[in-house]
Structures are given as structure tokens and as C-alpha cells.
Image: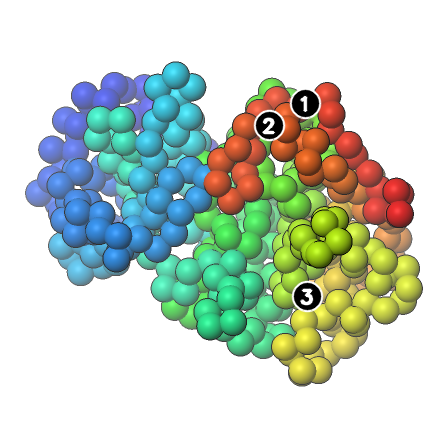
Amino acid sequence: MKFPCSFCVSSASWQANDQSRHDSGGQSDGKFHVFTYNELKSATHSFHFSNKVGEGGFGSVYKGQLRDGSFVAVKVLSVELESMRGEREFIAEIAALSDVKHENLVILRGCCVEGANRYLVYDYMENNSLTQTLLGGEHNRMEFSWELRQKISIGVARGLVYLHEEVMPPILHRDIKASNILLDQNLNPKVSDFGLAKVLRDEHSYISTRVAGTMGYLAPEYAVTGRLTRKSDVYSFGVLLLEIVSGQAVVDFREDYREHFLVEKAWTAYEANSLLQMVDPTLNNGFPEEEAIRFLEVGLLCVQEATHLRPTMSMAIEILTKKRDIEDVQISRPGFIADFMKIKMGKRHSSEGSTSSAPPSNYIWSSANSGR
């Protein structure tokens, strides 16, 4: 995997490169481009609020149209000078996406540096994210057939297989969640937002002093120890899979003032031999029961407490597509972070529940059948 030489240059050099490419109009020829600020300002109508299509922990996203007529999504990252927050995410995203191409990964068209702002330019995804389409409010939610859920689940898994097993060195995403799965005009899934991504230069693991991710999807052993492996992404994928099949929120806050975890609910249903109750009722029984159960069981395989029992992403695909029998593997209890309030007290926050800090001493790691 190669990294752009622009990592090593100053902002002034970036601006010089911007000007040298101005005449190209940022037109896509399959290569990474450095856009001028004026190009992006014009494309988004001065970043008008009507073109704003999303906002996350690392910046706002605007829809834009380039001079060649193509539509793009422009992410605006503001750099905090003291912590350099924003700069890290900017570089991480370029490092992860500038030299990798896969049908289930969002395409990074280019970037721009302007003062304290950093801009990343992607292909525009017409159908937004799974958060808006599958889990959106009553008026925004689309009807997701079983076949579409199957297609999205396997597509995301294939994107992760590419990152974990085909790219060298492997890339760990660290923030797999519904809002980071975008859908194109044909509802093909694209894994996006690589601002937390890490290149796994050691074959086995990476020790992070800055634990980052999203509550509910965060692998508990990573939150506790800072040790990041492929199985950390596998855990997050397992939660996402449960979410896609059930249509339920990862964490549900109810009138009893207690957090209800999707992982915990799925495990309870599995133990009671009633996994079918977890399937999204909006499907109106229009799904193959055996396959739905298999997908939910793969989700539980991925979130097992013991990391060595979690499958690789390629193994997960084999089971999802019936190339491997799930009866050949045993599902053990999942692990999850049980005490959100204590964790929040010890962490620094960005929007949408993302976190960024070293692991505090008050992390509580629980198996799903403890503390009931």
C-alpha cells in the first residue's frame, strides 16, 4: 500500500498543488485529486445549509456538483490546533482510501487544504446511510426487503474482507456502524468514514492509547485494554448485522431508565430458542426463516466475549452464503460494555456517540448473562 507524498508537505505546498490542478476542474479520471477551495465552494454553493447532507463526529458533509457535472460529497474537517484533532482524521482517511479500491468501499476523489480547514471529496451516495434509510423516522425510513438486507450485509462483509485480508498491510476501520454504511443509487453498500482507521503494521495487533469508536459497536476488550485487532472490527460488524436483521437500535433507552442492548436482547432470544422474534416485524414474515436465523447467529458469533472464537470476516461470509455450515461452530456468550454512565464520565466526546481517549479505570466489561 502506498501513501501520498503530500503527507510530508506543508499546507503551502498543498495550496501550490491546488493551483497547478485548477485547470483540470477536479474532473475524475480515477486518480486522487487536490481540489482548490474555490472549486468546492462553487460546487456546494458556498457550503449552503440546503446542501448539507450529514454531520458526524469529524465534520459536516455537503452535496456538491463539480464543473464536469458529477456529484460529490464534501466533508469539512476543522483542525483543533492544540490537539491537532481533525488533522489526524484527515491524514488517516487519505492513508486508508487513496490507494485502495473496492466496490463496497466509498471512493475518495480528492482533498483540499484551506487555512485550518481540511476537505475530503467523495463520490456522492444518493441513498445516504443505513441510519437514515433503515433506522430513520417513520417518514424517512425505506422499505427494506429481506433480499436487500442480505445484499447489504454481505456487501459490508466483503468490504471488510478486502481491508483485513487482501490489502497489505491490512487496514482496521475502527468505526463500523450504520451511519458509516452509505448506499448508492442502486442501494449497494459502501463502507465510509475512515477517520479512525489504523494500518495494522504488526500482523497481530495494535496498541492504542487513544481508544475511539462508537458506543454499542465498540468491542469491549478494545475499550478496556486498547488492544486493537481485526476481531475488533468483527465485533462491530456483528452488532451491525443484528441491527440490519432486527431493525432495532443498538442501544435502546426506555422508561425504566435502563439501557437495553441489542446484543443482550439477541443473546436472550438465542438462549430461549426464539431468535425469530428478533427479525424486523416490518418484513411481515416475508423472509426465509432459516436464513434469517443464520444471519442472527453469525451476528452472535461475531460478538462473542472470547475474541479467539469470533470468526474472520471471510469465514463470516462463508457462513452467511452457506459455503460453511454454522452447525460446525459453537456460539458462546457475547461481551459488551455494561455501564455507559461511568464510561461517559471518563471520556471526551464528539457527536453521534463517538469517543476518543485513553481507557479510563472505570470501564466495566460484562458478559451478556451477568448482572441480570
Which residue is under mark 3?
246
Q: Residue at x 24, y 40 (%)?
A: 33
* Separation (CA) of disc 1 from disc 2: 7 Å
| Residue sitting at the far left | 23
Q: Identify the image quadrant of residue 59.
A: top left
The residue indicated by pointer 1 is: 360
Furthest residue in direction top, as rendered:
82
- Per the model, the C-alpha gap separating discs 3 and 1 is 32 Å
Question: Closer to the N terminus: mark 3 or mark 2?
Answer: 3
- If you read the primary sequence from the N terminus, does the residue marked by circle 3 or circle 1 appear first? 3
Q: Report if the CB atoms under discs 1 and 2 are less than 8 Å apart.
A: yes
The amino acid beneath tag 1 is Pro
Residue at x 72%, y 49% (from the top left corner)? 257
- Answer yes or no: is residue 44 visible: yes
Q: Is residue 97 above or below residue 45?
A: above
Tag 2 residue: 347
Within-10-Å neighbours for mark 3: few <14, some 14–19, many 20+: many
Question: Where is residue 110, by image quadrant?
Answer: top left
Residue in the foreground of this view, choosing between 341 and 97: 341
Disc 3 + disc 1, Cβ < 8 Å? no
Cβ–Cβ below 8 Å for labels 3 and 2? no
